Image (tube, rainbow, N blue to C red):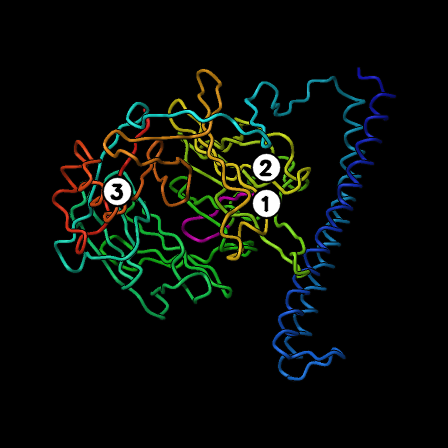
Amino acid sequence: MVDQNIIFYLCINFLSVRIIIELELMEEEMVVCFSILNVRFFKLLEKGHINCSNTIRDESRQSNFQTSYRILNARYCGHLKIKIMKIKTNLYLLILTIIVAGCSSNNQSSESTEGLPVIDLRKNYPEKEIILTDIAKVTYVHLSTEKDEYLYTGTIDYVSENTIVVGDGSSGSILFFTKDGAPKSRFNHYGAGPQEYSTGGWSFYKSVLDILYDEKEDEVYLFCGSFFNQIIQVYSSSGKYLRTVNCPPILEYFYTCRFDIFDNQSFIMNSVDSFFLFSKATGEVLENVKIPNSEVNSITSVNAFLPDGKPWSMAPRGWRMAKSTDGFNLFLPGIDTVYYFDKNKKLTPVLCTTPLARDLEPRIFLDNFLNAGNYQFMRIYTMHYSNYRENYPERPYPDRHYVRDKKTGEVFRQKIVLPDYKGKEFFISAYPLTVFQENIMHFELDLMELKDAYRENRLSGKLKELVATLNEDEDNNVFMFVEFK
């Protein structure tokens, strides 16, 4: 049996720390809300809609301003109530823990991160050159533009086992090519009707943000989002409309969300501080995938004051999951552990970072992780206002791209070179539009740069042969597919 005095002492300390953490979270969220309100206030003041006596000159804007204040006030009060409820829940859990600990032996299981590889967020690891063809099979593909209806503006949106999918940003067409780049099929349902979609970014109604393709089911999923609603329009590859799926109403920052196919029945998607599975047929949430300690350590935004005194707030970027063998790697900004989520819905820790991002100023965290072959590729990101503002062209905190050799445990800064393309360096990261299959990703190579390199005799092998056949004024860019060994 466990000593009851030790249990009582540990529980009291746990409760004290937990309450402090919860109270800090409430204060942070209050700052977020009032920072947003202050930004709105400053904008109105600059435009002359508010005078020195705080009287809003335009009655319609006065109504809008008051409405914004009420919404923010209600939202903060809602957060406050949620946090109080969580503290009560922790009290109940504390009592339950004492009862269970007093009535059972110490055979309770927990996911341990002991023994995992650790990445120091503050450290500048040494650079090491990697020859891409030594760690991966490399192939080059040019998507045919012989037929006018297959001309496009944009890039690859999805790659399945045998098909490359491209969303044409200019016409709204969805184009399908073989893995060799030959035209396969296409459709266009651009419009404002119930079975249609639009383009133009997340501020537009039913604008396409993500495209997925389930080749076995021959279903194309267009994630369409705006401030008003988020839906998934489903078609066949020939363009037949199949259904509309309403996304779960929990996407607080939907424009940072990414989704992918989890299995035959469900999608997986990230929200602000968690992940969830929802039905491909109905949009119903099937399961919440809660990352340990996400409520305490995850970073949903960073708030500060600019040198000119104005408030500034920014949410972390939304690249929080990447495909891995029979599952996904999941990571949240601020959490010190990367998890592998398999098809049996089990979370397994695979890598840790130190120290916690919330203990650093400015905030530094791992925001990108790819487990491929014998290597783990990652990006370390610093949240600082100078990384976002146009008047700071030289970023004082550039991204750091690292790679870890899983055999030796060595960590070093990426310098990835390609023998077929002299003078060109690459970074490997799990960007949402580059990793579609297990251990396979792609790079887009600018054709004009390739033509310059061709004339300077910096190309060789199959890449040189392909570029020699292309016209830089008429053809699209070249794609390099990388399959890790």
Residue depth check, mark 2 versus mark 3: number of the one nearer the observer: 3
Q: Quadrant of the N terminus?
A: top right
Kindly identify which residue carries mark 3.
479
Q: Residue at x 71, y 80 (%)?
A: 51
Q: Quadrant of the C terminus?
A: top left
Q: Position of residue 385 (x, y in %)?
A: 59, 52
- The tag earlier along the polypeptide, 2 or 1, is 1
Kindly identify which residue carries mark 2.
291
Q: Which residues are magenta?
A: 274-284
Q: Residue at x 79, y 32 (%)?
A: 14
Looking at the image, do the residues carrying marks 2 and 1 touch, with CB atoms under 8 Å apart? yes
Q: Position of residue 253 (x, y in %)?
A: 54, 55
Picture layout, residue 336 above or below residue 235: above
Looking at the image, do the residues carrying marks 3 and 1 touch, with CB atoms under 8 Å apart? no
- For label 3, the SS is strand
**Residue type at the position of mark 1:** Asp
**Residue type at the position of mark 2:** Ile
Q: Position of residue 257 (x, y in %)?
A: 49, 50
Picture layout, residue 284 above or below residue 131: below
- 138 magenta-colored: no
- The tag earlier along the polypeptide, 2 or 3, is 2
Residue depth check, mark 3 versus mark 1: number of the one nearer the observer: 3
* Callout 3 crowding tier (Cα within 10 Å): few <14, some 14–19, many ≥20: many
- The tag earlier along the polypeptide, 3 or 1, is 1
Marks 3 and 1 sit apart, C-alpha to C-alpha, by 34 Å
Kindly identify which residue carries mark 1.
273
